[in-house]
Image: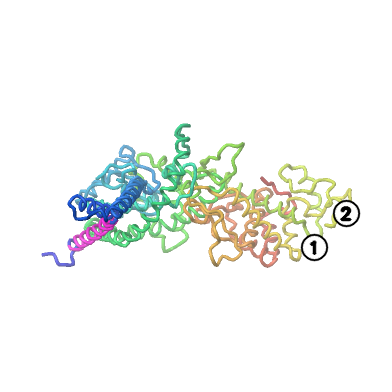
C-alpha cells in the first residue's frame, strides 16, 4: 500500500489545495456581485412593502432614493463587469509552432500527456526566453475557445541546446500542469484573475491612438497595422469615453485583485506541486541533468543577448540565428571553463531542434521577436527620408563588417567630434614630422571631417597655438590616433572629454529611445547610480545597457579609435567573440589585452603600454582614421 507521503498523495494534496484556493477567488467575485446587488435588494423590499401595506406613505422618499441609488449602482456594476469581461489579458509574445511545421515535437508532447494521463496542450509556441510554461488563452477576447487546453510555451534556447531526451524530461512537469488546469473551478478562477489584471492594465495604459485596442500595441504586435479610415475616426471619437471608463473601473479591479491575489498565488502553487508530483515517474533520472542544462543555457543566452545581440539591435540589425548562436556561445564557454567541459560531450546526440521541419526559419522568427521584445516594434534608429525605420536582418558571417566595424567607426567619430568641440591642448613631447605630413592627407578624405577647415584659428597663430600659415599644423589637427594619445598626455585632458562624450551619448540615446509600451526614457535614475550614464529603458522596462560612468564611456570610445586605426593601418580585422561580443583580431589572434591598456591610459594617463602594443601590432598612430 502506498504511504501517506507517496507521489500520489502529494498530487492529490496539491490538487485539493489548488481547488480550495480557486473557490476562494470565486468567493471574492461573488462578494463583489452581492455588494452590487445589495441596494437593488433593499429597493425590492421597499417596493414590496408598499404593495403589502407594510410601508406607508412616509417611506416614499426613502423608496425613490434607494431605487435611484440601486439603479446607479447596477449601472456602474454592469459597466465595470463589461469592462472586466472585455478586457484583453496580457498574452506572451510567442512564435506559434503548427503541427505541420513540427510533427515530431507535437508527437513528443502528446506522448508525454498520454503517459501522464492529462489532456494534451492545445498548441505549442516558442518564446525567446530560457523558461517554459502553460499559458491559458481561453479568455473571451484572448482568441481561444472556452474550455480549450492551455498553450505550451517553450523557451527556444532549449530546443537548440538540449537533446531530445533532456527536453522530454524538462517538459514533463510543465505538461502535467494541464491536468489541474482542466478543473472547472481552477479554470474559472484563472479567468477572473486574468480579467481583473487586464482591467488594471487598461487603466494604467497611457493614452494613445491605439489605446482602444490593448492588443494592438506591444512587442508582439505586427509591425504594420492597417485599420481603415472610418475605423480610425470611430476609434478616435470613442477613445476619450473608453479611457474614462477604464480609469473608473481600474481602482475597483485593483481592489478585487488585491483581495484575490494571495489565493490566486496559492492556487498556482498547488497546481505546480500537483504537476511536479505527477511527473516524478517520467524520466526522473534525466530531470536532474536537464535542470543543469537549464542553468547553463540561461548563462549562455544572457551573454549572447547582452554582449552580441544588443549591439546589433541598437543599430537596427537583428541577428537571424540567435538560437544557433547560443550553441556556439555555450560551446565556447565549455572550451574556456573546465567545469562545463563535460557538457559538450552531449553534442553528439540528437538535438531537440531536429524536431522542427525548418529550424532555420523558426530560429529567424524567434530572433526577430526577441529584437522587438527588447527594443520595440521599430528599431531605435533615426528614420531615413521620413520613412519609419525597419529591422534589417544580419547573419553571423556579416556581423563583424555590418555591426562591429560600424560601432567602432561611430564611436571614433564621436570621440574626434568631441575633441574638435573642446579644442586640443598643446601636445606634450617631441613633435613627429610624419604626423604633420599626414594632416593634408586626412583633409583630402571625406571621412576625416574633423580636420579643421582652412582659415580656421588652428591653421594660423591663434589661441590654440597653431602653426603659422603655410606650415603643416600640429599632430592633433586630424582624426589620428596620435592626436588622442597627445590629448591624454596633457594635464587635465580627460575630464571634460569624458563629460562631453557622456552628454552626447545620452542625447543620442534619448532621441532614439524606444517608444513601445513600458519604455520610460525620462524615468528617474535608480538610487545609488550617482552620475553614471543611464541608458533608456526597453519596452520590457529593463535598461538596454548597465549604467556606465564617463570614464568607462571614454575608454570604450578610445578603444574604438584604436581598433579603427588597427584595421586601417595594420591589417587587423573586426570579429565576434561569442561570449564578449565585438572583438579585434590581429594576425588571427584576439587582442584581449587591449581593453586593460586603454583603461590604464584613460584612468592613469599611462600611455607607454598602449604605445608598445601599437608598435608591436604595426599600427601607425600618425595615419588618419577612416570614420563613418
Decide if residue 153 is in sight here: no
Does the magenta-highlighted stretch encompass residue 369? Answer: no
How far from the left and from the top, in percent, is residue 167?
32, 52
Q: Which residue in the structure is indicated by mark 2?
A: 461
Q: Which residue in the structure is indicated by mark 1?
A: 429
| Element type where label 2 sits in the image | loop
Residue 355 image-quadrant placement: top left
Given residues 399 and 514, the one toward you in this image is 514
Give the alpha-carbon distance from disc 2 to disc 1, as whole Å: 20 Å
How packed is label 2: few (under 14 Cα within 10 Å), some, or many (20 or more)? few
How far from the left and from the top, in percent, is residue 198?
37, 50
Residue 475 image-quadrant placement: bottom right
| Element type where label 1 sits in the image | loop
Main SS of the magenta part reads helix
Query: Which range of residues does the magenta coloring cover?
Result: 9-34
How far from the left and from the top, in percent, is residue 622?
75, 53
- The residue positioned farthest toward the left in the image shown: 1
Does the magenta-highlighted stretch encompass residue 32? Answer: yes
How packed is label 1: few (under 14 Cα within 10 Å), some, or many (20 or more)? few
Amino acid at each position: 500500500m502506498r504511504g501517506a507521503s507517496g507521489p500520489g498523495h502529494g498530487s492529490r494534496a496539491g490538487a485539493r489545495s489548488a481547488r480550495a484556493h480557486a473557490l476562494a477567488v470565486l468567493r471574492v467575485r461573488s462578494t463583489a456581485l452581492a455588494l452590487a446587488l445589495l441596494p437593488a435588494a433593499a429597493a425590492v423590499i421597499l417596493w414590496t412593502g408598499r404593495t403589502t401595506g407594510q410601508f406607508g406613505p412616509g417611506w416614499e422618499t426613502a423608496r425613490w432614493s434607494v431605487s435611484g441609488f440601486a439603479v446607479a449602482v447596477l449601472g456602474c456594476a454592469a459597466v465595470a463587469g463589461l469592462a472586466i469581461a472585455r478586457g484583453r489579458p496580457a498574452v506572451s509574445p510567442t512564435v506559434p509552432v503548427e503541427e505541420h511545421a513540427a510533427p515530431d515535437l507535437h508527437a513528443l508532447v502528446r506522448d508525454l500527456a498520454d503517459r501522464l494521463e492529462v489532456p494534451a496542450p492545445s498548441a505549442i509556441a516558442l518564446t525567446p526566453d530560457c523558461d517554459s510554461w502553460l499559458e491559458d488563452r481561453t479568455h473571451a477576447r484572448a482568441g481561444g475557445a472556452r474550455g480549450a487546453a492551455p498553450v505550451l510555451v517553450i523557451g527556444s534556447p532549449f530546443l537548440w541546446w538540449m537533446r531530445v531526451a533532456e527536453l522530454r524530461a524538462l517538459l514533463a512537469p510543465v505538461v502535467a500542469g494541464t491536468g489541474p488546469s482542466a478543473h472547472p473551478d481552477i479554470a474559472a478562477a484563472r479567468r477572473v484573475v486574468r480579467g481583473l489584471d487586464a482591467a488594471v492594465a487598461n487603466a494604467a495604459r497611457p493614452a494613445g491612438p491605439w489605446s482602444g485596442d490593448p492588443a494592438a500595441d506591444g512587442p508582439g504586435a505586427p509591425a504594420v497595422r492597417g485599420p481603415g479610415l472610418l475605423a480610425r475616426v470611430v476609434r478616435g471619437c470613442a477613445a476619450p469615453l473608453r479611457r474614462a471608463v477604464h480609469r473608473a473601473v481600474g481602482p475597483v479591479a485593483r481592489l478585487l485583485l488585491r483581495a484575490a491575489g494571495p489565493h490566486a498565488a496559492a492556487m498556482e502553487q498547488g497546481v505546480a506541486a500537483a504537476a511536479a508530483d505527477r511527473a516524478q515517474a517520467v524520466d526522473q533520472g534525466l530531470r536532474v541533468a536537464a535542470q543543469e542544462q537549464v542553468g547553463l543555457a540561461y548563462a549562455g543566452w544572457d551573454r549572447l543577448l547582452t554582449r552580441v545581440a544588443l549591439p546589433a539591435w541598437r543599430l537596427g540589425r537583428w541577428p537571424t540565428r540567435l538560437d544557433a548562436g547560443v550553441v556556439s556561445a555555450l560551446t565556447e564557454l565549455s572550451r574556456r571553463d573546465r567545469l562545463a567541459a563535460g557538457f559538450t560531450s552531449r553534442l553528439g546526440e540528437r538535438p531537440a531542434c531536429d524536431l522542427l521541419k525548418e529550424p532555420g526559419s523558426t530560429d529567424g522568427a524567434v530572433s526577430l521577436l526577441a529584437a522587438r521584445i527588447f527594443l520595440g516594434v521599430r528599431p531605435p534608429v533615426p528614420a531615413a527620408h521620413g520613412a519609419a525605420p525597419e529591422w534589417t536582418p544580419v547573419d553571423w558571417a556579416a556581423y563583424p563588417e555590418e555591426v562591429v566595424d560600424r560601432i567602432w567607426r561611430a564611436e571614433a567619430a564621436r570621440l574626434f567630434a568631441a575633441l574638435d568641440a573642446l579644442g586640443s591642448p598643446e601636445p606634450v613631447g617631441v613633435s613627429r614630422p610624419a604626423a604633420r605630413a599626414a594632416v593634408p592627407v586626412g583633409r583630402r578624405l571625406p571621412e576625416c571631417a574633423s580636420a579643421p577647415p582652412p582659415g580656421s584659428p588652428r591653421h594660423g597663430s591663434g589661441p590654440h597655438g597653431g602653426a603659422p600659415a603655410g606650415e603643416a599644423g600640429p599632430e592633433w589637427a586630424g582624426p589620428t590616433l596620435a592626436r588622442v594619445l597627445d590629448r591624454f598626455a596633457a594635464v587635465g585632458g580627460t575630464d571634460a572629454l569624458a563629460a562631453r562624450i557622456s552628454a552626447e551619448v545620452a542625447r543620442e540615446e534619448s532621441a532614439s529611445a524606444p517608444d513601445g509600451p513600458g519604455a520610460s526614457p525620462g524615468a528617474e535614475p535608480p538610487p545609488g547610480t550617482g552620475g553614471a550614464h543611464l541608458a533608456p529603458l526597453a519596452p520590457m522596462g529593463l535598461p538596454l545597457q548597465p549604467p556606465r560612468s564617463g570614464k568607462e564611456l571614454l575608454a570604450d570610445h578610445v578603444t574604438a579609435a584604436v581598433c579603427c586605426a588597427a584595421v586601417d593601418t595594420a591589417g587587423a580585422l573586426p570579429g565576434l567573440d561569442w561570449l564578449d561580443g565585438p572583438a579585434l583580431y590581429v594576425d588571427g589572434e584576439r587582442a584581449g589585452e587591449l581593453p586593460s591598456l586603454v583603461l590604464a591610459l584613460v584612468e592613469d594617463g599611462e600611455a607607454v603600454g598602449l604605445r608598445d602594443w601599437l608598435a608591436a601590432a604595426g599600427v601607425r598612430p600618425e595615419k588618419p582614421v577612416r570614420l563613418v
